[in-house]
Image (cartoon, grey):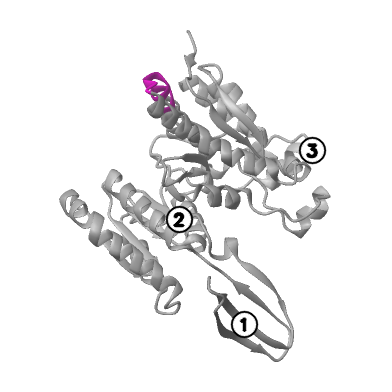
Amino acid sequence: MAKIRMKTPLVEMDGDEMTRILWQKIKEILIEPYVELKTEYYDLGLKNRDKTDDGVTYEAAQANLKYGVAVKCATITPNLQRVEEYNLKKMWKSPNGTIRQILDGTVFRAPIIVDGITPYIPTWKKPIVIARHAYGDIYRAVDGAAGKGRAELVFTDRNGSEIRETVHDFAGDGVVCAMHNTNKSIESFARACFNYALDAKLPLWFSTKDTISKVYDGEFKKIFAEIYEKEYKEKFEQTGIEYMYTLIDDVVARIVRSEGGIVWACKNYDGDVMSDMVATAYGSLAMMTSVLVSPSGVYEYEAAHGTVTRHYYKYLKGEATSTNPVATIFAWTGALKKRGELDGTADLCAFADRLEGAVKRTIEEGFMTGDLVALFKKPGVTPVKLNSEEFLQAIAERV
């Protein structure tokens, strides 16, 4: 059978640890036998980021802007322990944060629903999509230590005039943190959320804590409300879906009681936390898709989880691991599907759909990685635990 040909390359961003190992196996077993894979490759592994002074991350993001579609492996954001472990020059920033800043995008994360994997919250029957603002807040914050003295927030306008506000008068040691965001980025976030909700025909809930953060969070609330009234209200009413703003603690309570089928828009940190909570409640962090969408229509697909360090150390000892590759596979299928849509390559889109279907059928027929075995309950089917490569081969048999 002739392989499917691609017209335009994907930007391929390799990563770290166990996900890096699986990345290569996914290509070898599930993609390259069927697709004449065309990628522009960037190694975002921590060693290469350190070697290039993180320049490779910026190069990859610029390539993403050029070609329009990227697929990214999970990467390490180093803490002090990682700096020592890898003998790094410095504690490099999150590559995801850097890419999100350059693309000015919104991250949409949705669970992969499989028959037999029942959510921990029994009322959840439909997907809950987390829309995460991917710019600013603590991910672009300036922070530092403070001693006895006064910490101030100072803004200097273009004419040189200063506005000063006391943050805190310290009687002893402490810490300070300054965050920012831009109206332009918030507006892009709002439009991305409204457009996604319309395309998916799902209601949109947006939450902040404007009762406490009256100016900062209040600006998010105001911008969303203005854009909705001017640009989207009529479209939402015609589609039969709602837009609702409320406090984040209220949405948390509502979400737990809901049946799902909602787009939940969150600020950057809220989305980071809540997407992990939602993914885990649906069954596994490895069963969650993630796509970064920029206002100009640039896409970057990735798994919503980390590099699976514990399994990587076992792998280095020569032990077989049962690491779940589903989210990483769906990152590849999402990117291939979008590339096919943009290039008019219908057979590439069809292959991506076929591969996703094979993944789901493999699990539904009882063959899965260890993290799913305890969650799987389907009459007449006894789950079988496979190691990572066995699971990929089982999927290949069904493609």
Specify the label residue 132 is tagged with.
Answer: 2
Residue 13 screen position, x and y as percent: 61, 36
Q: How many residues crowd mark 2 within 10 Å: few (<14), some (14–19), many (20+)?
A: many
Mark 1 or mark 3, which is nearer the start of the sequence?
A: 1
Tag 3 residue: 317
Considering only vertical position in the picture, is 143 above or below 70? below
* Range drawn in magenta: 344-352
- Which image quarter: residue 15? top right
At label 3, the amino acid type is: Lys
Cβ atoms at labels 2 and 1 below 8 Å apart: no
Q: Which mark is residue 152?
A: 1
- Measured Cα–Cα span from mark 3 to mark 1: 52 Å
Q: Earlier in the sequence, mark 2 or mark 3?
A: 2
* Residue situated in front as seen by the camera: 285 or 42: 42
Of badges 2 and 3, the one in the foreground is 2
Q: Nearer the viewer, residue 243 or 11?
A: 11
Q: Residue at x 47, y 51 (%)?
A: 279
